[in-house]
Image (cartoon, grey):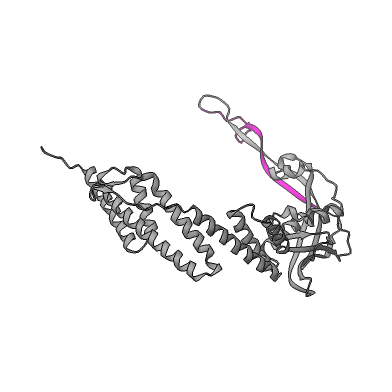
Amino acid sequence: MRHTITLLSITLLLVACNSVKRNQKLLAKGNYNQAIALAVKKLQKNKGSEKNDAHIILLEEAYKKAVEEDTRRITFLKKENDPATTREVYHLYHDLNGRQELIRPLLPLYSRSLDRNARFKLVNYTDDLIASKKAFLEYLYHEASLYMNKQSIADYRTAYNIYCEIDELQSNYKDVHTLKEDAHFYGTDFIFVTLNNRSGQIIPFRLERELLDFNTYGLDDFWTEYHSERQQSIDYNFGIALNFREIAISPERISEKEIIRKKRIKDGWEYKRDRDGNIIRDSLGNGIKVDKYANVTARLIVTEQTKSVLVGGNVVYRDLIARRDLNSYPLSSEFIFENIFATYSGDKRALDDEDWDLINNRFVYFPSNEQMVLDAGEDIKIRLKEILKNNSIR
């Protein structure tokens, strides 16, 4: 009987061989978990395939060595009796249990080469997991308490992260929920924000309210809160002062300029004539027509309305405990109101399209000083947001 080896068969064989070689290298380097994961992935597709027999043998060996290595490490750590090792002990038991749960659905695994089922020692780690988790939780709780007792911003934040880890392991552990809230509160930088107007001009209340509404800036900093009204229960370590030193509003200005438009335009037609005034005709006897041109003029009066406001100041970051300035950043904006319109006299045919755009415009009332400051305030808010985002308080 003749057997035909197809290109597909050769390709699959090469892929299988390469996979086995890769797993053998992982095993030789002590990367047992990676070797186990690769073998399981292959066997999950078809554990009865002959080409996967080598993976069964590799899986048995990698599993045995991984269990032996973790077990030796646990024995050593328990003898060492250091509370700081409870994390590693818990995770080692977690790995031992997870590894066998990964393999369990594939069992039994029959190896043709070994002529037997692969051997995997499965152990009930429930008691060990519970005991190691309990010891780990107690260690974390004690560590968090030590950081809380140091009473510094950085230590409160470290304690908060530890409480979060406890929460993930066991959500209802002791009074962790309350302690986590306390750690967050004490680890937060509360910043008192003030607005100081030293410009000699009135700042609209609406602008002042919007500038101090830090919820609109989208800063989203978990460890920072901005308050524009002082709260008695909070000790403010830092402050930010928005200082307006100049609000200069120009007078309302109206200027005019006259522009003369001249054009030579086509203005109908007439018959072409000879020197004697007779109409010149074509070969068919029809009179020859020629374009008639005329020079036209229009007088354009362009009126420009302008008014501007310049708002200048700075943003000062201040250490309220040490009573010293940390940093200062310039904060300024200029807003210009401008309206241009025009009227004309004379022949409208002399005007351009741009002239008509101005003619279609009209005089508008100048904005009030308050509105000008509000308009400049929109840009001030954008610039203030950039300063706050690009410069942390610490």
Residue 54 in sight in this render: yes
Answer whether residue 56 is magenta in the image: no
Q: How many marks?
A: 0
Q: Position of residue 38 (x, y in %)?
A: 36, 52
Closer to the camera, 100 or 131?
Answer: 131
Q: Quadrant of residue 133?
A: bottom right
Highlighted magenta segment, given as a residue range: 257-282
Q: Position of residue 261 (x, y in %)?
A: 73, 47
Q: Position of residue 352 (x, y in %)?
A: 69, 44
**Is residue 282 left or right of 96 when viewed as pictured?**
right
Closer to the camera, 42 or 148?
Answer: 148
Position above or below: 228 against 353: below
Closer to the camera, 280 or 2?
Answer: 2
Answer whether residue 260 is magenta in the image: yes
Q: Residue at x 85, y 47 (%)?
A: 365
**Is residue 343 left or right of 97 when viewed as pictured?**
right
Q: Residue at x 64, y 59 (%)?
A: 163
**Is residue 254 left or right of 295 when viewed as pictured?**
right
Q: Position of residue 95 (x, y in %)?
A: 45, 56
Position above or below: 159 against 296: below
Q: Quadrant of residue 131?
A: bottom right
